[in-house]
């Protein structure tokens, strides 16, 4: 019996190691393990920390400039308008999503969206919120200034509805821990997915002119 117990104890470290394949680990982690002094892995929250959610005059506003060399204001407006219209027809959109303004004289496009923003979807859990926001594009020859603004959420509407604005929920003050090195457990997931959604939209808009 003692021999059996001793054999099991000797094998336990091997069993634990076998639970993770080295080839499945991120390259950064493998390098870090082989070079003492480096962190075990990068901070997964890094790109969502301080400054990731800008506040302008008290309001959360994401903005970017879409570069379109050689394109006229009309061409840029038509392309952006078509893209924003396609967004209103995506599967995750509510019927309230639509183009509000498509002004050919001022070269301005404004669209409003209501969509599902999913945090987790598994066989046992569906965690999501209704996300509201506007996209505004001011177009001119060669470029367009784009904003994502008027952001707010309706969470757990099927059980215990909670409405939160971006200003009171995903700013640095509200969505980061005291150390500023991690996202808060609840509001942090809203911040992460909102930033991801913004990044996707801005990236796709820029891709229209590449």
Image: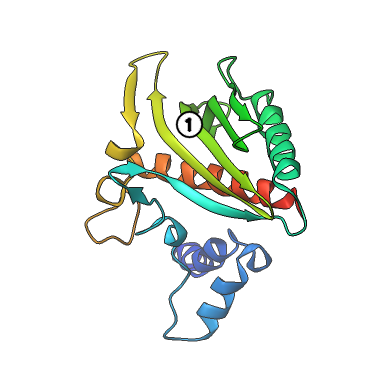
State the scheme by which the image is colored: rainbow
Extreme residue in the left direction = 178
Of 40 and 46, which appears nearest the observer? 46
Q: Circle 1: is it few (<14), some (14-19), or many (20+) Cα within 10 Å?
A: some
Q: Position of residue 63 (x, y in %)?
A: 49, 50
Q: Position of residue 11 (x, y in %)?
A: 54, 66
Q: Residue at x 64, y 68 (%)?
A: 22
- Count the numbered circles shown: 1
Quarter of the rendering containing residue 102: top right
Quarter of the rendering containing residue 73: top right
Dot 1: element: strand
Q: Residue at x 55, y 66 (%)?
A: 17
In this view, 163 is above or below 53: above
**What is the quadrant of the C terminus in the image?**
bottom right
Is 98 positioned to the left or the right of 40 in the image?
right
Q: Residue at x 76, y 43 (%)?
A: 75
Residue 44 visible = no
Label 1: which residue?
133
Of 46 and 75, which appears nearest the observer? 75
Q: Residue at x 51, y 86 (%)?
A: 35
Of 7 and 12, which appears nearest the observer? 12
Q: Position of residue 193 (x, y in %)?
A: 49, 42
In this view, 117 is above or below 100: below
Of 156 and 197, which appears nearest the observer? 197
Is 117 positioned to the left or the right of 51 in the image?
right
Residue 18 visible = yes
Is 93 positioned to the left or the right of 150 in the image?
right
Q: Position of residue 59 (x, y in %)?
A: 33, 41
């Amino acid at each position: 019996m003692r021999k059996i117990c001793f054999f099991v104890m000797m094998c336990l470290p091997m069993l634990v190691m076998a639970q993770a394949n080295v080839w499945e680990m991120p390259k950064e982690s493998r390098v870090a393990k082989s070079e003492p002094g480096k962190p075990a892995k990068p901070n997964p929250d890094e790109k969502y920390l301080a400054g990731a959610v800008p506040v302008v005059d008290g309001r959360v506003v994401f903005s970017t400039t879409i570069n379109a060399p050689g394109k006229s204001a009309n061409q840029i407006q038509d392309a952006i308008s078509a893209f924003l219209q396609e967004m209103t027809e995506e599967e995750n959109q509510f019927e309230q999503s639509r183009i509000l303004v498509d002004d050919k004289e001022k070269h301005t496009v404004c669209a409003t969206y209501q969509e599902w923003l999913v945090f987790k979807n598994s066989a046992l859990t569906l965690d999501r919120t209704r996300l509201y926001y506007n996209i505004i594009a001011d177009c001119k020859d060669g470029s367009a200034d784009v904003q994502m603004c008027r952001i707010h959420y309706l969470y757990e509407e099927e059980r215990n509805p909670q409405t939160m604005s971006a200003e009171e929920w995903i700013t640095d003050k509200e969505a980061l821990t005291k150390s500023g090195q991690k996202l808060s457990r609840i509001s942090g997931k809203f911040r992460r997915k909102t930033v991801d959604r913004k990044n996707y939209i801005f990236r796709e808009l820029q891709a229209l002119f590449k």
